[in-house]
Structure formats: structure tokens, C-alpha cells
Amino acid sequence: MTQPHDIELAPGTLLHRRYRIEYTLSKGGFGNVYLATDTKTSRKVAIKGAYFTDEHTREQFAVEARVLVTHSLKGVVHGDEMFEEGGRLYLVMDYVAGMNLEELQIAHFKQFRRPLPENMVLVLMALICMATQELHNLRVVHRDIKPANIKIDPSGQPILLDLGLAKLDPATNTLLAAQAYTPGYAPPEQCREGGSTDERTDVYALGATTYYSLTGRQPWDAILRLTELQQGHGDMPTPRDHAPWISPQTDAVVMQALDLNADHRFATPAAMQRALEDAYRALGDVRLCQVCHTLNAPDAEFCADCGAALQQHPQPPSPQSVINAAVPANEPPTLILPPKPAQAPAGGKLILQPEPMQTPRPLLPRKPRMSWLATMALVLSVIALVIPVLGQLLALVVVLPMGLIARGNIAHSNATVRGMGRAMTAVMLALLNVIGAVLLVYLVATGKIHPFG
């Protein structure tokens, strides 16, 4: 059987007498996606080429092409045409510039050292729920919603890509070529051999994508979750377990969408969209710090994390401005990804491994004035080190309680890693100061040191 790397098109290849291949955008389990130029219109397009042309792949490829070419759906990539050349199937689609949601999360964390802001995630995912509902209105189940399949275009609009695993009628059996799933984003019914999938399958994937967008961490695989629960262990952490600053309402929406029992999830993406919009409204007019991208209270004048002055909004920002404000200014170059390793377990169901994710560690939350208190404790502890007698009393009576109070508030509420570091340093220096003083008194009292000769 021909291997995927043997059929990759070289730059400059001309397809269908009009599409000139520029380079490979991505490589997946079923085909490559290329950036190409339409020589007739000079327009940039994306072309998906199938690795194989067996009957099942051909039929599944036709399902994707029929949906994308026939319909123009808001929030879903549009298709131009499908053709066959050189024994291979190709689908021409609009090229959507920008980063996908996974790349955006990674770029945001590199720049701001924290996951995407909650209000931005709620807006983006509500729009993706709307796009998914448009597919469901055509009786199409996407079946592969994940961060890598959501592109954020230059205007800040999320676009749903890749209907390679889509199913036209939820009531029908899944085509063999579409019997695949991505661990972490597929519900139990999709992972099981012969399991049925419907609209609630996409709801689970929407919940998993929201989970990753809020925390920067990939959700547990559904089968692992089931196994842990059957063995009497706990379920995976909720978004608030990773990021305590996330609102309880948002946390509840995500976990309902991720319920292992399909009957307990939102019945439709539209229902989940309404819940996300309610959670967004419940946040109020929060203010995003442009320096560290921390969300602050609507009446705050300075960021509780870094202390930077906050921009004052004469009126609540629009959802679009929320997205634009949170997208990093510098877009990373387009990545040419390696092929996803395909595992074919007994029964023939293919497992699409997700692209490697740089998952940021959970940050400690923030509380107003606690970082300032930790800083003051650190300064006083340094002063106490250089002042004899009074310095030790200052360390014991003032610095130690102040550092412990700051540490306790930072650990259990809304604080930052920087504030925690200052508090711990202050406490350690104060302890060192007090221990040194006690040791000195002991040595003098026992006659081992004679300070006056």
C-alpha cells in the first residue's frame, strides 16, 4: 500500500489545469491539505487530497464535498469543487488565513503565561456552537470538532474546518472511512466499536474544545474516564480545578457538555450556545489587562495581577472586540505538521492521535492587594536581615505573619505565581533571620561565643 509521504505533492505541481501547489499546510490521518493558487483568479485556496481511493474513502470524501460545495454556512469553511486526478481525490476549499485554536492557545500562553481569557473563549465557542447547529440543521454531524479544526481568521471569526469524519444522517450507520476519533474530544459512544453517534456527539466535542480553550489542557479520553469511574476513582478535573479564576457557571456548562451519558448533555449545540452566552453575560463588563491578559472587575482601575492601568470602557465591549483584544499581535508562521500516527485496533476503527499540544501548567489565581502584601513582606524581610536586634523582632512579629497571610490568600483565592514566589521568599528570609538570632543567643548563653571578648 502506498504510504502517505510517497504521494505528497511537490510545490509547483499543477492540478486540474488551474491549481498550483504552494506548500503543504497539514498532514492528517486521511489526507494532506495544501495551500494552492488558483491561476485563473490568483486566489489562494486550500486543497485537500485523499491518501487512498477505496470505495469507502471515496464515499466519505463525497459526503464532505457535498456539504461544503452545496451549502454556504456561516462559520463553516466553504468548498469550491471536488475532482479526481491521477487516481486521487481532491477537494478545493476557501483558504482561511490565521491560526487554529490550538495554535492560538499556545501563542497566547507563550506571550502572556496564562490560557486564553474566559470571556474570549465563551464568545468563540458560542460562535462555533452556532456553526455546528447549522450543520445539524442539514442533518450533518461533524464528529471531529477539536481545537486544530477551528481556525480564527484575521477578522477574529472562528471557522469550523474538516468534515472528513462527518455523517450525513445521524440515524444512519457510520461509513467505514469515517469510523475514527480523536482521543479526548470523542465521547464514549464514538469510541466504542459499533457505537451510535448523533448531535450530542458534537456537543461532547464542543465541551472538550471549550475545556482545552479555558485551561490549555487536553481533556481525558472518554474511555479512561469511564475506566476510572468504574474502578471507584474520581473523574477528570473540572476547568476550575486547573484554573480557579473560571466562573462556576462556565465550569458547569463545560462539564454538562462533557457528561459521559449522552442524555445528560445539552440536546443541541444551540442549547449549549445559549448556556455559553448566559455565562458570558454573567461575567459582566470585565476588563482585560493589556499587559498580562488577566480579567479584572469592571470597576477596577489597575490590574490586580501586574498593577498596570486598565483601559476604561465608556460602554461594554462588543463580543468582536473581546476576541480582537485577546488575540496575540504576532501570528506564528504556518506549520507543516508531521502525519498523525494511525492506530488500527481490532475491529478496524482508526484512532486519530491529536497533534502534540504544549499544555501550560495551571496558574494560581489572583486576589487584589495580595501580591502587593507579598512584595511588602519581602522588602521588610530584607531590611530585617541588616538591622541587629530590632531586625529580628521585625522579622518575628511583622514579616512572618504578613508573609503567611499573603501566602494563604494567594493559595486559596485569586493570585499569581509571582505573588506566591514573593510571599514564600519573605517567609524563608524571616525564618532564617529568626533562627539565626535564636542560634546566636544560644551560643552566647552557653559560653561558646564571647561577644565582649
Image: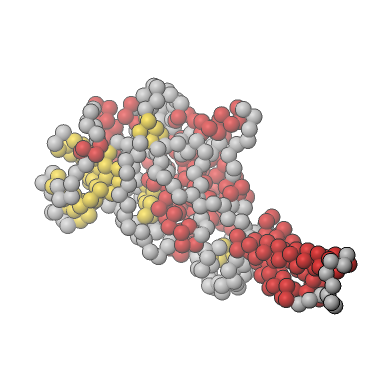
Specify the quadrant that holds the N terminus: top left
Q: Is residue 52 visible?
A: yes
Considering only vertical position in the picture, is 330 above or below 207? below
Q: Is residue 299 left or right of residue 213?
A: right
| Residue furthest out toward the left | 17
Count of numbered circles in the view: 0
Q: Is residue 397 visible?
A: no
The answer to which of 109 and 38 lies nearer the viewer is 109
Q: Is residue 291 left or right of residue 302?
A: left
Q: Quadrant of residue 431?
A: bottom right
Residue at 54%, 51% in the rendered image: 361
Task: Provide residue 38's location: percent of width, then percent of height.
Answer: 17, 52
Q: Quadrant of residue 312?
A: bottom right
Considering only vertical position in the picture, is 281 above or below 314? above
Specify the quadrant that holds the C terminus: bottom right
Residue at 32%, 40% in the rendered image: 339
> By what rule are the colours in the image chosen?
secondary structure
Q: Is residue 378 left or right of residue 340?
A: right
Task: Provide residue 398's location: percent of width, then percent of height.
Answer: 79, 70
Task: Provide residue 179's location: percent of width, then percent of height.
Answer: 37, 29
| Residue furthest out toward the front | 453
Residue at 50%, 36% in the rendered image: 221
Task: Provide residue 207's location: percent of width, then percent of height.
Answer: 50, 43
Residue at 22%, 54% in the rendered image: 44
